[in-house]
Amino acid sequence: MFQTFSFNHVLFLAQAGLWTLLLSFMALFGGAIFGALIMLARISLYAPLRFIAKAYIYVIQGTPLLVLLFIAYFGLAFAGYDVPALVAAGFAFTLYAAAFLGEIWRGSIEAIGKGQWEGAAAIGLNWPKTMRFVIVPQAVRVAIPPTVGFFVQLVKNTALASIIGFVELTRAGQIVANATYQPLSVYLTVAAMYFVLCSCLSFASRRLDEKFHNNGVHQPIT
Amino acid sequence: MFYFDFSGTLARWPEFVHAGLYTILLSAAAMLLGLVIGIVGAFARLSSIKPARFIAGSYVEIIRNTPFLVQIYIVYFGLPAVGIRLDALTAGILSLSLYAGAYITEIARAGIETVDKGQVEAARALGLSPYLTFRHVILKPAMAAVYPALTSQFILVMLATSVVSVISIPELTGVANDIQGLTFRSLEAFLIVAVIYLGLTAAFKGLFTVFDRTLFAFKYVGR
């Protein structure tokens, strides 16, 4: 009646792992674009923009991701868009990643000394040029390790997309667990797959941090 | 056309209140147990005993590099296969505490590393007992040093309690899910719950500020 947990199931899980990766990258890219805007609004000279960005970050960081996922899923349906789970999940994860990346990057920008701004102003660079040639190139060194660190969070958190029915690694694990009735071995395999993926990323984040000598400043709250 | 209708959902406010209390209790239990696990884990990671270092190190790496959802599935659905059968609430609190403990281990370790060895030697030289040295010279200043990181982690633990709704624990997210199944106003139920979570976040942040002022009053002396 039940199948036994076999290599074919592991292959099925690995395939689902690709969907996990796809969703993670969607969230990373969407979050990077939207997060850059949030960061710019957050450091803007206009108080209303700063306030909006701050409120956005507060709301997203103060609500569970799972609730955010449900709101995106039901909200899009409510607004009349009948979208597949991948789109709803991608949308929710983009909103989520943008808040965290915006905050990480703001920290990185603010880690650059005031002297750099003043120096740039002294040689007559305007704001876009100061950002492009002076601030961002230095801030990137500060920002990369925590950004990779946050990507680990993102990969792990895509597991929640299984709850709204998107078939990624965790949902595939559930399917296999139900078919084989060997939940322990199946979920341990799933966990091992996440572990391989995430520990490589965590290791990379730590190595980059050592390389850039950030000494742990501006690490994301993980 | 779409329109909002909160009436049916709001009429069920006692259920939301009950679920909110459940979330608060779950969070508090996970924070406290996680803190205990974290402090023990931090000392294990810094100990001179190699196996202790190894066990604590692997624990932290395993928990931090796998999704919390999968950890819950392993505890609740997986462990019965080896004869450990836990009810939903125990499984939920256990997985939440283990999850919190791994992150708090790293935070507490960073805190303990800020304590100068000379401080401990001075305390011993002044005749403070090992217990008092541990409590007042190591633990308290260490926790004070990493208090902001610790409280952010506590907030994340509170938000993570939403995930235990998958093993049918009647906390906020689970109850919202039940209610939307009855009222068919899904978006409304989750929007209400989101607002409650925001309120809880603000309340916990306020509470942690009060704790900071009372527990670590020495930080503010002379300022």
Image (cartoon, rainbow, N blue to C red):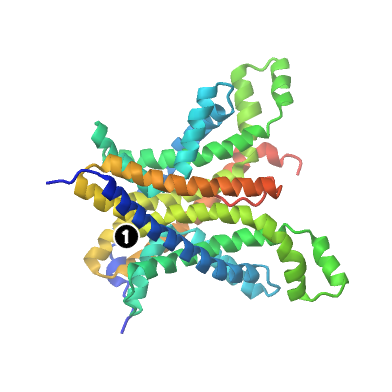
Q: Is residue B16 left or right of residue A141?
A: left
Residue sitting nearer the eye, A27 or A208:
A208
Spot occupied by residue B94 in the image (x, y as percentages of width and height): 37, 38
Instruction: State which quadrant residue A64 falls in.
Output: bottom left
Report helix, strand or loop for mark 1. Answer: loop
* Left or right of A13, for residue A132: right
In percent of width and height, residue A216 lies at 66, 46
Can you say whether A74 is above or below B22 in the image? below
Q: Position of residue B119 (x, y in %)?
A: 72, 25
- The chain holding disc 1 is A
- Residue B155 seen in render: yes
The reply, left or right, for residue A171 in relation to residue A102 is left
Q: Report whether A222 appears left or right of A189.
A: right
> Which residue is located at x 21 percent, y 46 percent?
A180
* Label 1 Cα crowd, 10 Å radius (few <14 / some 14-19 / many 20+): many
Quadrant of the rendered image containing residue B123: top right
Tell me the kind of residue under disc 1: Val
Q: Which residue does the image show at 49% across and 53% down from the upper left? A: A153
In the picture as drawn, the residue positioned furthest to the left comes out as A1
Compare residues B141 and B17 and report the one nearer the observer. Answer: B141
Residue B209 shows in this picture: no
Q: Which residue is mark 1?
A: A167
Q: Residue at x 86, y 75 (%)?
A: A124
Question: Which of the pair B169/A108 is nearer the observer?
Answer: A108
Q: Residue furthest right?
A: A122
Q: Position of residue B163 (x, y in %)?
A: 37, 52
Residue at point 65% right, 52% down? A218
